Amino acid sequence: CDRGIGFSLAKHLDSQGFHVFASFLNNQSVEQDQLVKTCSNRLHTIQMDVSNVQQVEQAATHVTAEVRDQGLEFWGIVNNAGICFIGNVEIMAREDMYKVMAINYFGPVNVCKAFLPLLRQYRGRIVNVASNAGLVPVPLMGVYCASKAALASMSEVWRFELQRWGIKVATIIPSGYKTGIMAYDKAAMAERWWSKASDTVQRDYGRECFNIKFKQK
């Protein structure tokens, strides 16, 4: 919920009277303070990097205790965290490819595995935010496309696997929104990818191909 759809959804659900557990990559950020100040005391923020299994499991333990102690019903989880790096697959550094998959695909897997006992108990639901890019291949977004396609496919698997417990699974495919997902230092990323590229890749592509010019309206 650091920004974008997650931030707005947390505010909206709070305004509708829900008890919201809003996870933040940085639980001491300006955005976290802003969300807390504009919402009711029903909203709680938690530290959770979805690619960090330990943090996800700690969050699940915390939420389970809060649900029990406050006499609440656990209605569901929203897997919204996502990142996207723009670049040709061959020039993208391997660790950044892994990071996209770790957050966009394995992140929801980590969250679901940790929260499924609570979901089964209350017959809750899972909402996964996928992307049009997971349905249609987009040049220079290959890794992001693959991660969202994997998430959409896993959502269909969960829909069948979890129906015996009455757990519903929804996949949201939003269109283009100004969420800040592209707000990373592209020049610094290009420099790092160039420094890690092989001599052959540097020669065949040239330095300019590493400088992605992405226009977001």
Image: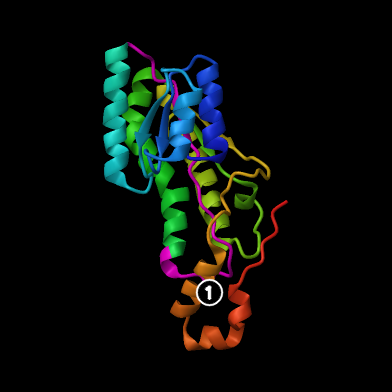
Residue name at image x 38 percent, y 18 percent = 122
Task: Compare residues 39 and 51 and report the one nearer the observer.
Answer: 39
- On the image, the x and y values in percent for residue 6 come to 52, 35
| Helix, strand or loop: magenta stretch | loop
Figure disc tally: 1
- On the image, the x and y values in percent for residue 83 come to 51, 52
- On the image, the x and y values in percent for residue 57 come to 28, 37
Question: Magenta stretch containing residue 86, yes or no?
Answer: yes
Crowdedness near tag 1: few (<14), some (14–19) or many (≥20) residues, C-alpha within 10 Å = some
Does residue 69 appear to the left or right of 48 in the view shown? left
Residue name at image x 45 percent, y 63 percent = 96
Judge whether residue 46 can be spotted in this image: yes
Does residue 118 appear to the left or right of 32 in the view shown? left
Dot 1 corresponds to which residue?
91
106 in relation to 74, above or below: below
83 in relation to 198, above or below: above
Residue name at image x 44 percent, y 27 percent = 36
Does residue 15 appear to the left or right of 132 in the view shown? left
- Secondary structure state at the residue bearing disc 1: loop
- On the image, the x and y values in percent for residue 11 come to 53, 26
* Residue range highlighted in magenta: 71-95
128 in relation to 65, above or below: below
Question: Magenta stretch containing residue 98, yes or no?
Answer: no
Which residue sits furthest right? Answer: 217
Task: Compare residues 170 and 201 and report the one nearer the observer.
Answer: 201
Q: Amino acid at mark 1?
A: Ile
Task: Compare residues 133 and 190 and report the one nearer the observer.
Answer: 190
